[in-house]
Image (cartoon, grey):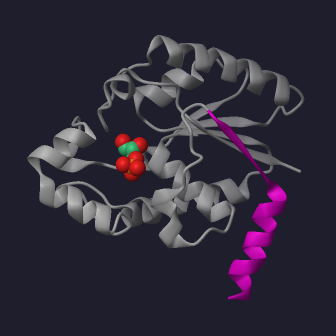
Amino acid sequence: PRPILLTRHGESRDNVRGRIGGDTVLSDAGEIYAKKLANFVEKRLKSEKAASIWTSTLQRTILTASPIVGFPKIQWRALDEINAGVCDGMTYEEIKKNMPEEYESRKKDKLRYRYPRGESYLDVIQRLEPVIIELERQRAPVVVISHQAVLRALYAYFADRPLKEIPHIEHIMLAAVISLLVVILFVLLLHIYAK
Ligand code: G3H
């Protein structure tokens, strides 16, 4: 079956400082991950001439893809991380201290909470629709290198997890590759069409 491989970017400099959002380059550990991922992808997709690599438009995903050779790379703005609006560049501790009401509202309803001048998880889920349609059309494997909030939404879609679980999915580790088989996709399509 045709796999869809989902992975977060390698660790970024902002990840090291605990800052959300931003557009920093990879840390040393992040660069090591990018090389390991390239190795894995090149081995795993060796005979898959039509495979492609999809990233967001942010440096940390583009740099994670950069050591991979031999496959076309496509950048999608829709794969960019959740926009944290006025909180972009802050740590969670800073948000808690300086904007306690925002911190509490998000804690209460992480799915619907929208960062001031930014996005909610529901916004992210909505903007992913064209990506999902395009993923479903692919005949060859796709490696998606993106961000935590986005991958939670994509994973939940293909694994048929309920909406309310999405912001809390735990296993989207930095640098973990989640492989979804196309079988899941067909089951899901049947499910949608049956509704
Ligand atoms: O920078 C954003 C984070 O990757 C999203 O994580 O929704 O759990 O705060 P969070």
| Stretch of the chain drawn in magenta | 176-195
Lateral position of residue 52 relative to residue 99, left or right:
right
Q: Position of residue 111 (x, y in %)?
A: 39, 66
Q: Nearer the viewer, residue 138 or 85?
A: 85
Q: Position of residue 15 (x, y in %)?
A: 38, 28
Q: Main secondary structure of the magenta part?
A: helix
Q: Residue furthest left?
A: 98
Lateral position of residue 146 relative to residue 140, left or right:
left
Q: Is residue 81 visible?
A: no
Q: Position of residue 31 (x, y in %)?
A: 53, 14
Q: Residue furthest bottom?
A: 195
Q: Residue at x 44, y 66 (%)?
A: 126
Question: Residue 109, located in which quarter of the rendered image?
Answer: bottom left
Q: Position of residue 95 (x, y in %)?
A: 18, 45
Question: Residue 194, located in which quarter of the rendered image?
Answer: bottom right
Residue 94 is covered by the magenta coloring: no
Q: Is residue 141 visible?
A: yes
Question: Is residue 41 depicted above or below 95 in this figure?
Answer: above
Q: Nearer the viewer, residue 125 or 168?
A: 168
Q: Residue furthest top?
A: 28
Q: Nearer the viewer, residue 106 or 151?
A: 106
